[in-house]
Image (cartoon, rainbow, N blue to C red):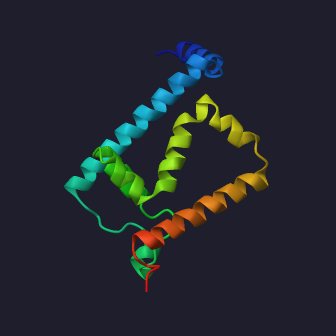
Amino acid sequence: MSAPTLAAMAVRWRRGAGSRPGALLRTLLRGAAGAAAAVAAAALHRAHDPGVLCPLRLITGVPCPVCGSTTVFIEAGQGHWAAALGANPVTVAAAVGLLFAPLGPGRWWSELRADRRNTLIAIALAAAWVWQLERLGISRP
């Protein structure tokens, strides 16, 4: 493709991005890319299980708030939706939020003040950490 053709495509893409069909297209593209990545992660995991990937959990045995995020994508790539949700529900919620961001949630998020966004992130990380501690039995005596 020549440079003018690429430039024209970029202009057309930007022009349509703010429209409802453009938002739907971006959502579909994000969903397809996420699904492809999940299927690839599941296939890679079947071929070679690397074990625990989290450095904190590997060294201390204590999970971090995002532990289970890789498992979410592996389980989703295998079609095990309940197991994906059980591995880290906060990661699932974040992935769904990112998927549907072009349809409106992204605008809501960007319009929040920075301190409110940071508070929501801190709450989500705290909830995820409590979930991981309970899921892996760290919080039980």
Q: Give the camera-side residue of 7 and 30.
A: 30
Q: Give the camera-side residue of 132 and 52.
A: 132
Residue drawn 44% across the image and 57% down it: 69
Is 53 displayed left or right of 22 in the figure? left
Residue drawn 50% across the image and 15% down it: 2
> Residue reaching furthest front?
141
> Residue reaching furthest bottom?
141
Q: Position of residue 91 (x, y in %)?
A: 49, 53
> Splitting the image into 4 quarters, where does residue 121 fall?
bottom right
Is the residue 67 above or below the residue 95 in the image? Answer: below
Residue drawn 49% across the image and 62% down it: 66
Q: Give the camera-side residue of 140 and 76.
A: 140
Q: Position of residue 45 (x, y in %)?
A: 26, 55
Q: Position of residue 92 (x, y in %)?
A: 47, 49
Is the residue 101 above or below the residue 129 in the image? Answer: above
Task: For the C terminus, give its image quadrant.
Answer: bottom left
| Number of disc labels | 0
Is 52 displayed left or right of 111 in the figure? left
Q: Position of residue 22 (x, y in %)?
A: 57, 20
Residue drawn 76% across the image and 45% down it: 112
